[in-house]
Image: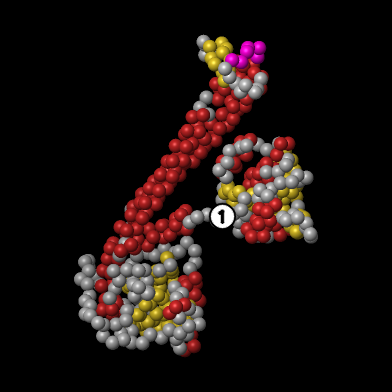
Amino acid sequence: MSLNWKEIDLVLTELDIVGAQVQRVVQPSYDTLVLSLYKPGKATELLLCVAHGACRVHETGMPVPKAEKPQRFMELLRSHIRGARVEAVDQIGSERIVRFRIGRAENERLLYARLWSGAANLILTRADGLIIDVLSRKPSRGEVAGGHYEPAESGPPPREFAVRDLPGDGSFNARIDVFYAEHGSELSRQALLERARKYFSRVRASLESRRATINEVADGYSDPERFRQLGDILMANQTVSIVNGGIHADDFYRGGTVLIRIDPKKSTLDAARDYYEKSRKAKSGAQETAAELAEIQTALDELAAQEAAIEAQENPYTIRAFLAKRRTSSTESPKRYPGLSLELNGWRILIGRSAAENDTLLRRHVRGNDMWLHARDYAGSYVFIKGRQGKSFPLEILLSAGTLALYYSKGRSSGAGDLYYTYVKYLRRAKNGPKGLVIPTQEKNLRIQIEEDRLRRLRRLIGKDVD
């Protein structure tokens, strides 16, 4: 529920901000703005909110967190009104539009807060009404930079309004602050806590599902020693005939006899080698799954700690900032790239599987300071590592990207090979060459030995099993 014009009028009469200097401008979310004002002996945090169903202006005593990223309108206000003084504040008739006159002479700026639930906005203009910019750009209303905004006073409202008798003590501003924190529709603490609980429930379910999947995989790695024993038994029974897809042999490890399945296309010796390989992979797989299960448990513990902290949080603005960060980092769809892609320790690796994908990645998805890798002397994929500002490429990331470049090339079967690597800005397209062909300069050499454990881990990250 938004404030009516009489409530806005009462809020303004209680405020003592004329002559106050604008010291800070904070925009914790896209629809909320806080001006930190100071005059000798009086500091005021003035909140302006244009959220649907919760449009209001009032002094707030709750700490307001900064936005995760600087907001456009906040940066604009900082450049135009920070350091200036509030010369006048008034409500335009009964229109629920509050006008702040800030600064003097040629530096005078008018900040309008239109607090209509259906069309709320914050508009910054020059003294003559020329719009500098607005919080929410509305071309159909002419509310864009360069437009004109100068609302006229209206007559009396079509019906009577009354000031609500809000619970609590203190000024009307203080009671509004508390009321909206607890009951302000979707922005109230309770409503935000419900959204937070759904977020925690969703993330917890995802982690639990992942843990169940890893546990199933771990079951297959539970007894690597048995695979080795079966290999030994096969080696000791190479002359025994294969019957019905296997051999019956004495189990000199556990006693009795055992039926060992064998691919009819393979010899007993090849089958024994396969069991030895299964034993080796089971050992490394058991270590990997144990590490993944430990990571999942750590994530669950951290999630529980976060949930407890949010449940104990009394400030709805802090809860909302937490949810806003999770919305942008967790629920938005990741950017789609041609070919294959994975994220490893915060680094994005892109893999082109064809000349067309290589060319598209080069043209549209990489920049000069991204890293390019390609198998030397073999046709194959271009692999790119997306650069990160202020970060150098770690050796482990280069080795992982190099492993993928060699694996997705004609040199895969060799198990080892040399790679070119250089920055994308040092690539030159081959004149009249086939699509995607480039000539590298300032390239360096990287020797890669394909490690099965590393390859398996990387292939799992891109959702594929090793061929």
Residue 239 is covered by the magenta coloring: yes
Amino acid on which disc 1 is placed: Arg
The one of 223 and 249 positioned closer to us in this rendering: 249
Residue 263, picture quadrant: top right
In percent of width and height, residue 442 lies at 77, 55
User: Image quadrant for the C terminus?
Assistant: top right
The one of 94 and 269 positioned closer to us in this rendering: 269
Label 1 Cα neighbours within 10 Å, binned few <14 / some 14-19 / many ≥20: few
Q: Is residue 377 above or below residue 230?
A: below
In magenta, the rendered stretch is: 236-243
- Residue under the point 47% across and 33% down: 216
Colour scheme in use = secondary structure
Residue 390, picture quadrant: bottom right
Q: Is residue 164 above or below residue 378?
A: below
In percent of width and height, residue 307 lies at 37, 50
Q: Is residue 87 visible?
A: no
In percent of width and height, residue 316 lies at 35, 61
Q: Residue beneath label 1, please?
A: 336
User: Image quadrant for the N terminus?
Assistant: bottom left
- 182 horizontally vs 383: left or right: left
Q: Is residue 219 visible?
A: yes
- 423 horizontally vs 336: left or right: right
Residue 190 is covered by the magenta coloring: no
User: Principal SS element in the magenta part?
Assistant: loop
- Residue under the point 75% across and 44% down: 378
- 454 horizontally vs 177: left or right: right
Residue 252, picture quadrant: top right
- Residue under the point 29% across and 82% down: 94
In percent of width and height, residue 77 lies at 47, 75
- Residue under the point 35% across and 80% down: 98
